[in-house]
């Protein structure tokens, strides 16, 4: 207990609290701008951390990242432009709710669900960090392969409309993910002699182009110069207690799933949001409402995001293994400040570990007031002419695409992907499966090749480990069961029709 009290004293100093508030505000600003990501916001804070003590330095990264993730939902809900990759999973749902005249509810769900999910992730970090860390260490390439395949299976669930077009969109995303060097042999693929393409097509510029630029092109192809109707954005917190209570099981399931998926090194909240939204739709009593502005999937995926963000620190703090890009930056800061992560942190500096957890709790509590302010100020977007708004968005898209690798090539990728997405959407092809393929494709390929080498080409090796076998059977069941159910229904329907014809032919006796 004295260690926990010492950690509280480290956090509640005026300087640390000021750093948390400033970093949270900065993360809110960066995350809300299309094209700028939470990872970018964190990277920009690193130089400032050089001049801070260890606890304020880590507190700045935690607060900034937490707020940037939730801020990414704001442009997604209002303009169908996800501010961060994690927001892309449910951007269509949030935007549909806005078009239905409920922008405050869409943003309120994101704010409140994220806060609750983050607090549950904090509790997990507090009590079961070592246990989850040990489970995460048991994941090899076999388990990661099946987890990635489970993510790909979500494409059939998240895409609305034709399943065939959704599958083709997913295959296009997987093809885009193969551009560059082979992950094991470093053989160039589809690079056509371009040095830039050997590094692959970066996900961030592709996402920016497919959502932001395509939305701008769609508007220009419709009614250029049109001013957006001034939509009233009321209190985003109104009715949220009732909404979350009505979907309490979704909040708990999304938070629990995000906590587990975030603890796996390399998985992160982006993959968790896609799977969580798909699971919500799969087990919903009203799946036909998804994609029309339904709150159920939005609640679950938002809770998953911040829960995964919190639990991603479990392998980072307990074993020194980054869970995602943000914690990779944080591990570097920890080492630089002498807070070497790993099992010895509980022996040498346990107060630092608990101080980080307390910062998580404060950051997730700050989501409510700062998120409320951000939503209230966001209504000024609708007061601008859409022409000026599009010009501003395009400028941020160019800056964000260039900043990923400090290369003009990223801007070219963004422009090309925007045109491709505009053409595909005009023909009825969904964009979400393409993004899903680009995100998960490298994870599938790398772990499949690694596993095949380990298993010496024997595919049964994917089922020899208990966790891998469980994930594999569950994933295959998701593929096969719908086909079996459909076949049984068609057989019964055919049998009923045949029986009816037979009775008609027999006639009255």
Image (cartoon, rainbow, N blue to C red):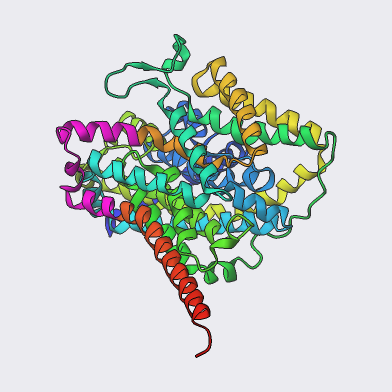
Q: Quadrant of the N terminus?
A: bottom left
Does the segment drawn in magenta span residue 79?
no
Lateral position of residue 1 relative to residue 109, left or right: left
Q: Position of residue 186 (x, y in %)?
A: 31, 17
At x 52%, y 30%, the residue is 204
At x 62%, y 52%, the residue is 94
Extent of the magenta region: 444-473
**Which residue ends up furthest to the top in the rendered image?**
193
Front one among 490 and 127: 490
Front one among 487 and 170: 487
Does the segment drawn in magenta span residue 466?
yes
Q: Position of residue 431 (x, y in %)?
A: 57, 39
Front one among 172 and 351: 172
Can see residue 179?
yes
Q: Position of residue 361 (x, y in %)?
A: 44, 54
Compared to residue 432, the image places residue 307 above or below, namely below
Q: Position of residue 402 (x, y in %)?
A: 57, 21
């Amino acid at each position: 207990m004295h260690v926990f009290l010492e950690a509280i004293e480290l956090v509640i100093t005026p300087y640390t609290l000021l750093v948390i508030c400033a970093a949270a505000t900065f993360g809110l600003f960066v995350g809300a701008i299309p094209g700028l990501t939470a990872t970018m916001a964190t990277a920009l804070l690193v130089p400032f951390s050089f001049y801070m003590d260890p606890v304020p330095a880590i507190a700045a990264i935690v607060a900034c990242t937490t707020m940037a993730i939730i801020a990414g939902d704001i442009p997604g809900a209002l303009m169908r432009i996800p501010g961060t990759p994690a927001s892309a999973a449910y951007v269509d749902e949030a935007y549909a709710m806005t078009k239905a005249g409920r922008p405050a509810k869409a943003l309120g769900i994101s704010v409140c669900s994220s806060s609750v999910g983050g607090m549950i992730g904090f509790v997990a970090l507090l009590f079961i960090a070592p246990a989850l860390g040990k489970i995460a260490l048991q994941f090899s390439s076999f388990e990661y392969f099946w987890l990635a395949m489970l993510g790909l299976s979500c494409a059939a669930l998240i895409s609305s409309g034709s399943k065939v077009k959704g599958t083709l969109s997913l295959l296009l995303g997987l093809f885009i993910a193969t551009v560059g060097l082979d992950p094991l042999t470093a053989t160039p693929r589809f690079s056509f002699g371009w040095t830039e393409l050997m590094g692959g097509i970066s996900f961030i510029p592709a996402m920016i182009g497919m959502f932001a630029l395509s939305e701008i092109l769609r508007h220009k192809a419709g009614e250029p110069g049109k001013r957006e109707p001034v939509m009233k954005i009321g209190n985003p917190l109104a009715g949220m207690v009732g909404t979350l209570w009505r979907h309490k099981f979704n909040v708990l399931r999304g938070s629990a799933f995000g906590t587990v998926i975030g603890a796996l090194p390399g998985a992160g909240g982006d993959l968790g949001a896609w799977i969580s939204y798909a699971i919500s739709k799969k087990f919903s009593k009203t799946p036909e409402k998804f994609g029309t502005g339904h709150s159920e999937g939005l609640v679950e995926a938002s809770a998953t995001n911040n829960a995964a963000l919190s639990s991603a620190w479990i392998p980072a703090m307990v074993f020194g293994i980054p869970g995602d890009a943000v914690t990779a930056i944080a591990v570097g800061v920890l080492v630089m400040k002498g807070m070497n992560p790993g099992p010895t942190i509980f022996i040498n500096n346990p107060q630092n570990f608990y101080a980080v957890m307390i910062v998580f709790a404060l950051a997730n509590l700050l989501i409510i007031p700062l998120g409320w302010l951000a939503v209230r100020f966001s209504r000024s977007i609708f007061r601008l002419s859409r022409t000026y708004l599009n010009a501003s968005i395009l400028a941020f898209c160019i800056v964000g695409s260039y900043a990923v690798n400090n290369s003009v090539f990223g801007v070219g990728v963004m422009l090309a992907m925007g045109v491709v997405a505009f053409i595909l959407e005009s023909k009825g092809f969904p964009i979400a499966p393409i993004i899903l393929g680009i995100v998960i494709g490298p994870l599938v390929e790398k772990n499949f090749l690694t596993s095949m080498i380990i298993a010496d080409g024997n595919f049964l090796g994917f089922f020899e480990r208990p966790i891998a076998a469980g994930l594999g059977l569950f994933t295959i069941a998701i593929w096969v069961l719908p086909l079996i159910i459909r076949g049984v229904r068609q057989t019964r329907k055919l049998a009923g029709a045949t029986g009816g014809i037979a009775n008609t032919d027999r006639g009255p006796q």
